Image: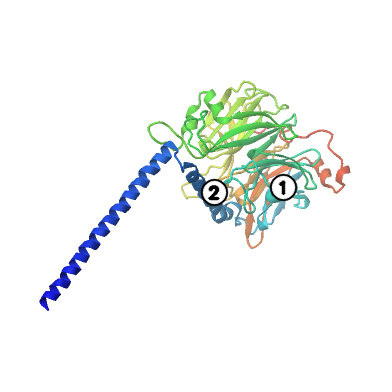
């Protein structure tokens, strides 16, 4: 019995040793495979061996899927809808002391639907466009996979102008420029990634922010890590043709402001920048009817949000003649006031001592010095938008401000009293994003009086900015 027991123990020990050696061999095999995969992957990435292309496509597909999940799950609630900051206020407050006119409102309503609306000073709707991307621009082919909308709203409207015949020209943010008739028919589409703002100059041409997506290394920008966007300034005809184009980074480098292009994340010993560095959000030329001084006809005012910079360059010489950096925080919508000054919607996205945030309108002088704070939010007069935002000087000295993120626009008289207010309220205490409320000349109301194609047209184009009274 003892011999049999010892024999069984010997067999068990032999089996254990065999199993241990097989396990060790298996572990070594797995480690060898992992090592081969690791160094093989490095070689594939470095020298782009097979199957580099398939791996890159798979990664792009994953990034695309992840971006859509982020958009659906995070961006929609936080960017487009939120609880109203002014739930007890009526949608319209009108003292009768606002500058006469009608208003263009662009934003989002319920059901994730984009709209542009013409309202009178009492809030009555004179006309409305349905700007559903999937209806207006089906089968877009100029966008990469990660830019193509898949669910409503897909994007938002950022930048719009009304033409003399009642047509609307607007940006689908980061994905295209469209001209649409009052009846909703598309006049033309410009397949270029336009965004943020549209300014119509005296000659009728449009000045628009644009961008080009680079997914590969580009010898023009050796220190940029793809994918990245090259920001551009476009001059576009009323017929939708690009007349002139400037690369913002090349414009800065040509004028010796290379440092503004390399303030972001760096990698290795050599400067290399990824992500959204400059964030162009406005470009508009000096009005022909405005009296010249330091600023002249041919000068263009430009805003770069992410480097807190505003500059003016001459579009004939490409020379930057004025630049201000660090005097505002995430600013938008700079506007010429006169030949020596311009104003800015300074989002001022920083916290105060009590962790409250207030935006402000500031005035810059070509002579330098500290900007003048013309109007700022406070506990008594809340005003804050961390992103977006517009302002418009009116001929009687009033100032119309769009507080985008709180779905509100309000008009101030020269004593800074609110004389008109509009709030885009939805149901159940919710509000929806409005990108801009823009005052149009009163005569434009005739374009939307229901007379159709026979509606009267203005004899000449009226620009509220060009007839602006001097701001003190």
Name the residue carrying label 1: 136
Q: How many marks?
A: 2
**Mark 2: secondary structure:** helix
Judging depth in this view, the residue of 152 and 306 nearest the camera is 152
Residue at the top extreme, as displayed = 317
Horizontal placement of 8 versus 275: left or right? left
Judging depth in this view, the residue of 340 and 298 nearest the camera is 298
Can I make out residue 399 in this image?
no
Q: Position of residue 284 (x, y in %)?
A: 65, 32
Can I make out residue 273 in this image?
yes
Frontmost of labels 1 and 2 is 2
Horizontal placement of 155 versus 34: left or right? right
Q: Position of residue 338 (x, y in %)?
A: 66, 28
Check the picture and name the quadrant holding the C terminus: top right
What whole-number distance in Å separates the C-alpha atoms at marks 1 and 2?
Answer: 23 Å
Q: Position of residue 170 (x, y in %)?
A: 70, 42
Q: Residues within 10 Å of mark 2 (few under 14, many from 20)?
A: some
Name the residue carrying label 2: 64
**Mark 1: secondary structure:** helix
Image quadrant where residue 373 sits? top right
Residue at position x 62%, y 54% in the image: 151
Horizontal placement of 26 versus 60: left or right? left
Check the picture and name the quadrant holding the N terminus: bottom left
Residue at the bottom extreme, as displayed = 1
């Amino acid at each position: 019995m003892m011999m049999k027991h010892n024999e069984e123990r010997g067999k068990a020990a032999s089996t254990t040793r065999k199993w241990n050696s097989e396990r060790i061999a298996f572990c070594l095999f797995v480690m060898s495979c992992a090592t081969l995969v690791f160094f093989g992957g490095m070689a594939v990435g470095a020298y782009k061996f097979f199957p580099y292309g398939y791996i890159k496509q798979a990664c792009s597909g994953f990034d695309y899927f992840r971006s859509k999940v982020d958009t659906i799950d995070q961006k929609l609630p936080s960017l487009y809808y939120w609880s109203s900051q002014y739930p007890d206020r009526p949608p319209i407050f009108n003292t009768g002391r606002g500058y006469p006119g009608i208003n263009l409102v662009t934003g989002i309503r319920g059901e994730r639907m984009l709209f542009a609306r013409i309202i009178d000073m009492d809030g009555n709707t004179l006309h409305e466009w349905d700007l559903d991307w999937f209806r207006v621009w089906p089968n877009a082919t100029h966008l990469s996979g990660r830019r193509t909308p898949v669910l409503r709203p897909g994007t938002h409207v950022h930048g719009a102008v009304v033409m003399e015949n009642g047509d609307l020209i607007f940006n689908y943010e980061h994905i295209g420029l469209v001209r649409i008739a009052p009846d909703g028919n598309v006049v033309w589409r410009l397949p270029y990634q336009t965004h943020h703002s549209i300014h119509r100059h005296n000659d009728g041409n449009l000045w628009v922010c644009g961008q080009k997506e680079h997914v590969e290394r580009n010898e023009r920008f050796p220190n940029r890590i793809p994918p990245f966007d090259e920001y551009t300034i476009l001059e576009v005809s009323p017929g939708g043709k690009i007349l002139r184009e400037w690369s913002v980074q090349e414009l800065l480098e040509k004028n010796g402001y290379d440092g503004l292009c390399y303030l972001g994340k760096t990698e290795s010993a050599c400067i290399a920048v990824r992500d959204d560095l400059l964030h162009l959000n406005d470009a508009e030329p000096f009005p022909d009817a405005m009296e010249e001084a330091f600023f002249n006809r041919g000068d263009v005012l430009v805003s770069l949000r992410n480097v807190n910079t505003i500059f003016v360059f001459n579009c004939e010489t490409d020379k930057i003649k004025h630049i201000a950096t660090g005097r505002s925080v995430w600013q938008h919508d700079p506007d010429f006031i006169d030949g020596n000054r311009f104003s800015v919607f300074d989002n001022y996205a920083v916290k105060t001592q009590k962790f409250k945030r207030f935006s402000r309108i500031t005035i810059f002088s070509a002579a330098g010095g500290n900007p003048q704070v013309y109007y700022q939010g406070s506990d008594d007069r809340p005003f804050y938008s961390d992103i977006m935002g517009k302002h418009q000087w009116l001929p009687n000295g009033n100032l119309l401000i769009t507080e985008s993120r709180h779905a509100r626009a309000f008009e101030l008289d020269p004593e800074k009293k609110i004389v008109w207010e509009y709030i885009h309220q939805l149901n159940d205490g919710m509000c929806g994003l409005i990108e801009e409320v823009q005052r149009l000349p009163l005569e434009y109301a005739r374009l939307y009086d229901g007379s159709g194609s026979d509606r009267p047209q203005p004899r000449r184009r009226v620009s509220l900015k060009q007839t602006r009274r001097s701001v003190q």
